[in-house]
Image (spheres, rainbow, N blue to C red):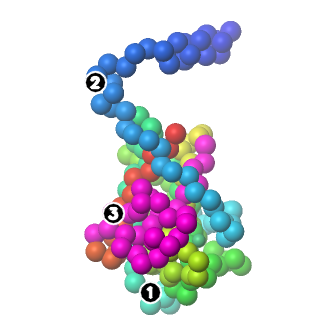
């Protein structure tokens, strides 16, 4: 009885005209989905930093927020990152350069890792799955600006390019449906 009532209310809300103010709060479109590719592995360790002590690769910090489609911070959202190592290889036996974390109360995340190497057939990229608490998984990839291979990679999407502050700091806000 209660659930039917709620459903009718939710349905009715869809037909309410949005006021000008309400339009201004609509935060734009959800982040584009991309293939997960062949190298995703479930059950990555929970950690902020993927940096390996022995690696000499340049470090990279990626930070930003996970937002709902109406621009609210998605607290406790899951982000699972994986990317190629300094040689362009994925660790398919262990979990090097793989890890998951959760956003804080303001929807923020911070990943510390290395700049992944380019491997044949792809431009430089980072894979990620983003899942708001209790919500649907968004699988996508992040790209780097000014990469020679960007225009030759059929998967590349300009809207998934991180904003970079120098070579070592990237920013990207995810919008989940
Ligand atoms: Fe990849």
Q: Position of residue 115 (x, y in %)?
A: 44, 78
Q: In the visual, does 93 lie left or right of 163?
A: right
The CA span between labels 1 and 3 is 20 Å
Secondary structure of the residue carrying numbered label 1 = loop
- Magenta range is 136-165
Q: Which residue is mark 2?
A: 21
Verify whether residue 65 appears in magenta: no
Indicate which label's residue lies in the foreground, 2 or 1: 2
Q: Residues within 10 Å of mark 1 (few under 14, many from 20)?
A: some
Q: Position of residue 54 (x, y in %)?
A: 50, 90
Indicate which label's residue lies in the foreground, 1 or 3: 3
Residue 143, visible in the rendered structure: yes
| Residue depicted at x 33% and y 77% | 167
- In the orientation shown, which residue stands out farthest toward the right? 93
Q: Which residue is mark 3?
A: 163
Q: Quadrant of ligand 1?
A: bottom right
Quadrant location, the N terminus? top right
Q: Which residue is mark 1?
A: 57
| Residue depicted at x 39% and y 40% | 28
Q: In the visual, does 149 lie left or right of 18?
A: right
Secondary structure of the residue carrying numbered label 2 = helix
Q: Position of residue 34 (x, y in %)?
A: 58, 57
The CA span between labels 3 and 2 is 29 Å
**Residue 74 position (above or below residue 62):** above
**Residue 120 position (above or below residue 131):** below
| Residue depicted at x 67% and y 70% | 39
The front one of 106 and 137 is 137
Verify whether residue 149 appears in magenta: yes
């Amino acid at each position: 009885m209660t659930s039917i009532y709620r459903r009718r209310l939710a349905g009715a809300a869809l037909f309410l005209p949005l006021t000008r103010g309400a339009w201004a709060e609509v935060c734009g479109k959800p982040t584009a989905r991309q293939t997960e590719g062949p190298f995703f592995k479930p059950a990555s360790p929970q950690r902020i930093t993927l940096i390996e002590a022995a690696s000499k690769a340049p470090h990279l910090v990626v930070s930003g927020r996970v937002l709902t489609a109406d621009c609210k911070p998605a607290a406790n959202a899951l982000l699972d990152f994986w990317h190629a190592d300094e040689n362009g290889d994925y660790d398919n036996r262990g979990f090097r350069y793989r890890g998951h974390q959760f956003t804080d109360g303001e929807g923020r995340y911070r990943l510390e890792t290395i700049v992944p190497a380019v491997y044949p057939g792809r431009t430089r990229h980072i894979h990620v799955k983003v899942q708001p608490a209790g919500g649907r998984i968004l699988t996508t990839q992040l790209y780097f600006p000014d990469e020679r291979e960007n225009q030759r990679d059929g998967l590349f999407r300009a809207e998934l390019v991180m904003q970079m502050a120098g070579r070592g700091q990237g920013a990207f806000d995810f919008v989940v449906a």
